[in-house]
Amino acid sequence: MYPAEEVTTDNESHVLVYGIDHSIKSGLSLHEVLDEAKKQNAVTTAPHPFSLLDALREDSVYCDLVEAFNSSNVDVYSNLRAKKFAKEKSLHVVAGSDSHVQSTIGRSTNLIHSENKLDNVIAAMKHHKIIIENTGYVQPKEALEHIRYKIQNSAFFIDKYTSQFYPRALWPIKILYKLYMVNPEGIFWNMFYRMSIVALRRISKKINFEGYDHRLFRERNLANILKMVF
């Protein structure tokens, strides 16, 4: 086990930090996170750099490594844009499983040319002695398992967010939540997931390849999101 952390910056983007001695607090700017990582002689990676949320996007150039493939980016276009961006900027790439459930651990793997010791591994990563070994997307059943995990652990925040921004929808959402928890793997939710993936792919294509402003999705404005879907 090697010490590492996913840090959330002040604009809600994610940075992976490997080889840390102590935790880096969230809410710092990207460059503050990178400075703290440098003080600890750690390595930084830009995970899912062009996903619709939590992404560094063009600021990924400041990290030591960039994820060109993320197993959870099932919209596909996020990965295509990351690969294209890394090639254009001559960045060294890695892959990530972005696993939050046991079944997807190791779905994507990297090969590090190093002795199996922390200092050697970190040094090898810094000198780009790491290559993508294997890639694969999560399957629908695994994605649904991940979604269930997130919903179960975010019920309070979903309720708070809905109350603040969509108060009229609060009770319908509570009813949907109860129905979902009764049978989270039911046919209806599988169909809903597949329809959502189609919508996400349309949005991702527009943002990553057709010049739409990525902030439109991050603002979580339902009207703007629906416009990008249709």
Image (cartoon, rainbow, N blue to C red):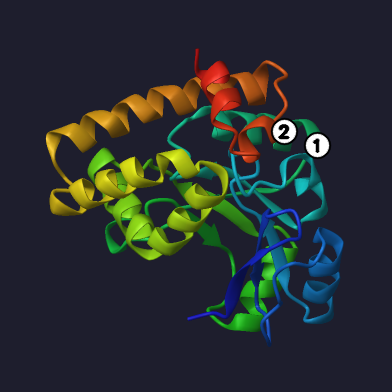
Figure check: 148 above or below 6: above
Instruction: Find out whether the residues at labels 2 and 1 contact each other: C-beta distance under 8 Å.
Output: yes
Q: Where is residue 80 in the image (x, y as percent from the top left)?
A: 58, 29
Q: Position of residue 66 (x, y in %)?
A: 67, 49
Figure check: 204 above or below 124: above
Identity of the residue furthest to the top in this view: 230
**Residue that label 2 marks:** 85
Question: Within 10 Å of the Cα at label 1, are there few (<14), some (14-19), or many (20+) other Cα atoms?
Answer: few
Relative placement, left or right, of 1 versus 186 is right
Which residue is found at the position 70% from the left and 57% from the top?
Answer: 128
Q: Where is residue 107 in the image (x, y as percent from the top left)?
A: 37, 52
Q: Please name the amino acid that badge 2 sits on.
A: Phe
Question: Within 10 Å of the Cα at label 2, are there few (<14), some (14-19), or many (20+) other Cα atoms?
Answer: many
The image quarter containing residue 194 is: top left
Which residue is found at the position 71% from the left and 77% from the top?
Answer: 24
In this orientation, does residue 204 appear?
A: no
In this orientation, does residue 153 appear?
A: yes
Task: Kindly state the secondary structure of the residue where label 2 is placed.
Answer: helix
- 199 or 49, which lies in front? 199
Q: Position of residue 3 (x, y in %)?
A: 57, 80
Marks 2 and 1, how far apart in space? 6 Å
Q: Please name the amino acid that badge 1 sits on.
A: Lys
Which residue is found at the position 48% from the left and 39% from the top?
Answer: 73
**Residue that label 1 marks:** 89
